[in-house]
Image (cartoon, rainbow, N blue to C red):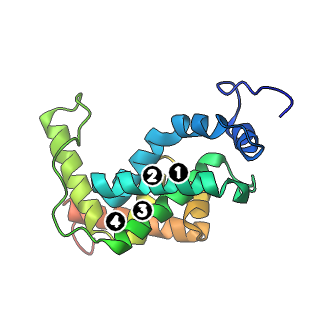
């Protein structure tokens, strides 16, 4: 590498290119920038701290090793989301959680009691949804990805994401008692 890259100022694509060119610090910067968001995706996908931690670790190792497969057609974050979601799905297929959702570390300290109850209700309702609907809702409604980005992450058509979100929202409303069945 002929020039030293300013890691803090470089965009994600430049960091990925630098990593592929042998910069030993570039991927570390990508990790620092995106670990919290990827952790949130994994927690909402797995609903289990240990599975999520393992999935995030698996995902970042896979991303590090397969960085040359990043084609630059989508944002680096979209590419990472897909790897994290796939790692979560792999972990969930291996070990299906048999216990109820954990009741620790769900609020961020600013939440009041009622907010914590709502958060627990939403997590339980999410866990009852089919996997496709849950993943679509997590990516679009909770992580703020566009329908197009979520479609890339899950490798499905945009229309599939829209229908999964609509069905998932309707099911969530029914589960949470916000709407009666058949209305």
The answer to which of 98 and 108 lies nearer the viewer is 98
Mark 1 → mark 2, Cα distance in angstroms? 5 Å
Which residue is labeled 1 in the image?
A: 60
On-image quarter of the N terminus: top right
Task: Using the rendered view, name the quadrant where residue 177 is placed.
Answer: bottom left
Who is closer to the viewer here, 36 or 140? Answer: 36
Where residue 83 appears, as percent x and y from the top left, is 54, 59
Question: Residue drawn 61% across and 70% down?
Answer: 157
Label 3, on which residue?
A: 88
Q: Which residue is mark 2?
A: 57
The residue labelled by disc 4 is 170
Query: Marks 1 and 4, how far apart in space?
Result: 34 Å
Q: In the rendered view, does 105 fall on the left or right side of 61?
A: left
Q: Nearer the viewer, mark 1 or mark 4?
A: 1
Residue 39 percent across, percent down from the top left: 41, 46
Contact check, label 1 and label 2, Cβ < 8 Å: yes
């Amino acid at each position: 590498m002929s020039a030293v890259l300013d890691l803090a100022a470089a965009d994600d694509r430049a960091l990925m290119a630098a990593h592929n060119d042998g910069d030993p610090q570039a991927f570390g910067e990508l990790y620092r920038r995106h670990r919290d968001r990827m952790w949130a995706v994994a927690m909402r996908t797995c609903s289990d701290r240990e599975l999520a931690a393992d999935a995030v670790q698996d995902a970042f190792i896979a991303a590090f090793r397969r960085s040359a497969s990043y084609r630059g057609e989508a944002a680096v974050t979209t590419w990472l989301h897909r790897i994290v979601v796939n790692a979560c799905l792999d972990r969930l297929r291996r070990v299906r959680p048999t216990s109820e959702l954990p009741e620790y570390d769900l609020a961020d300290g600013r939440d009041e009691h009622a907010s914590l109850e709502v958060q627990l209700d939403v997590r339980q309702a999410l866990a009852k949804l089919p996997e496709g609907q849950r993943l679509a809702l997590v990516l679009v409604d909770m992580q703020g990805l566009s329908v197009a980005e979520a479609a890339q992450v899950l490798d499905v058509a945009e229309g599939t994401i829209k229908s999964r979100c609509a069905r998932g929202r309707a099911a969530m409303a029914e589960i949470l008692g916000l709407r009666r069945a058949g209305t």
